[in-house]
Image: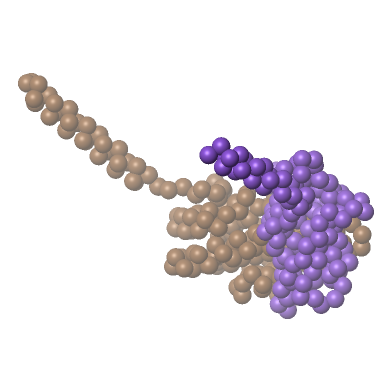
């Protein structure tokens, strides 16, 4: 019985040691462009699995020449959109980019592609690279 | 009075009070949950803009039907599509519920430099066939927005890449072409589905 308990504890300890990726993306949505437009928006959740804040200073894509992080705010009834120079994901926390809030603006598509990459950097350090499908717009 | 009769009398009184209470509650009229209905509908100012078909848009355009009016711009990636989607969804639910006549959804551009009639037509058309897109000169737009208390301000940006701050409210115009009620937001489909029939039933 004691051996079994000891083995179980060791097993649990081993499981706790399994490495999770430091930064993980989920719930990724890429909008269709509006008719006559090429710009899209990207929404997603970013989770920080480390015990230090993660700073994202740049986002790039193989499918868009220009990717910018923006935030919509509605204050005193006025909607404003402002570019954010960086995004902080707190230690052990999740930041959600969603409608009416923070979002990525994807501008100047490089070619007609049915999928895109998104790379998240802190300076020159690549933190995370993901891929997402692109549904064509109606025109 | 004997104790027995007293108890009966008290029970009857309690039943009567309970009945009155229920009756009062069910006859109290429901109120809008999100809309602010103006104490007196506001006439629209004189202005002259154009729609996606190059027809003139003025105060008369908004007569004969209820209109849900939003001020935004087609280069807006987030809140404008989101709001128009909510209005379209609310309209669809009202149709499902048999509400008639249905309001018309209108987008007035606060970015007349970039939003041509063709541009705004394509954009509003994405959210429904009956939708109206309005654009025109900045001076005429200002006549309309300042009378309605709608704010907008173009932001600095390079060349064609700029944002426009704008009021997030949706305005309801009545069939006399007057500003009738204000939905300040945040905009929710359920709120429109609840409030619009209530408001239109009480009109004029």
Q: Position of residue B198 (x, y in %)?
A: 46, 55
Q: Residue at x 73, y 76 (%)?
A: A136
Residue A26 appears in view: yes
- How many numbered marks does the figure carry? 0
Q: Position of residue A39 (x, y in %)?
A: 79, 67
Is A71 rendered above or below residue B122? above
Q: Where is residue B148 in the image (x, y as percent from the top left)?
A: 68, 52
Q: Residue at x 67, y 47 (%)?
A: A15
Q: Can you tell which quarter of the image residue B108 is in?
A: bottom right
Q: Colour of chain B?
A: brown
In what quadrant of the picture does the N terminus of chain B appear? top left
In depth, the one of A108 and B154 nearer the eye is: A108
Q: Residue at x 21, y 35 (%)?
A: B15
Is B108 rendered above or below residue B8? below
In depth, the one of A11 and A133 nearer the eye is: A11
Q: Colour of chain A?
A: purple
Q: Position of residue A113 (x, y in %)?
A: 80, 76
């Amino acid at each position: 019985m004691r051996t079994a308990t000891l083995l179980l504890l060791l097993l649990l300890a081993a499981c706790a040691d399994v490495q999770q990726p430091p930064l993980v993306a989920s719930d990724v949505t890429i909008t269709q462009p509006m008719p006559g437009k090429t710009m899209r928006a990207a929404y997603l959740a970013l989770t920080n699995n480390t015990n230090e804040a993660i700073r994202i200073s740049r986002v790039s894509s193989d499918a868009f020449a220009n990717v910018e992080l923006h935030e919509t705010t509605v204050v005193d009834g006025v909607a404003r959109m402002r570019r954010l120079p960086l995004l902080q994901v707190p230690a052990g926390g999740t930041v959600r980019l969603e409608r009416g809030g923070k979002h990525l603006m994807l501008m100047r598509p490089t070619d007609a592609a049915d999928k895109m990459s998104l790379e998240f950097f802190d300076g020159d350090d690549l933190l995370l690279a993901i891929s997402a499908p692109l549904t064509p717009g109606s025109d | 009075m004997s104790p027995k009769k007293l108890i009966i009398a008290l029970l009857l009184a309690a039943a009567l009070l309970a009945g009155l209470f229920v009756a009062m509650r069910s006859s109290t009229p429901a109120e809008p949950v999100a809309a602010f209905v103006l104490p007196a509908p506001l006439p629209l100012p004189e202005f002259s803009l154009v729609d996606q078909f190059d027809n003139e848009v003025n105060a008369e355009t908004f007569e004969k039907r209820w209109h849900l009016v939003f001020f935004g711009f087609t280069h807006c990636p987030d809140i404008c599509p989101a709001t128009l989607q909510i209005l379209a969804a609310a309209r669809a639910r009202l149709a499902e519920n048999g509400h008639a006549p249905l309001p018309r959804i209108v987008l007035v551009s606060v970015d007349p430099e970039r939003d041509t009639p063709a541009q705004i037509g394509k954009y509003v058309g994405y959210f429904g066939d009956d939708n109206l897109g309005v654009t025109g000169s900045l001076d005429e737009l200002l006549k309309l927005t300042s009378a309605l208390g709608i704010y907008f301000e173009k932001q600095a940006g390079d060349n064609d890449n700029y944002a426009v701050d704008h009021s997030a409210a949706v305005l309801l115009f009545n069939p006399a072409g007057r500003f009738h009620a204000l939905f300040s937001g945040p905009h929710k489909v359920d709120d429109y589905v609840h409030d619009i029939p209530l408001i239109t039933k009480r009109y004029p």
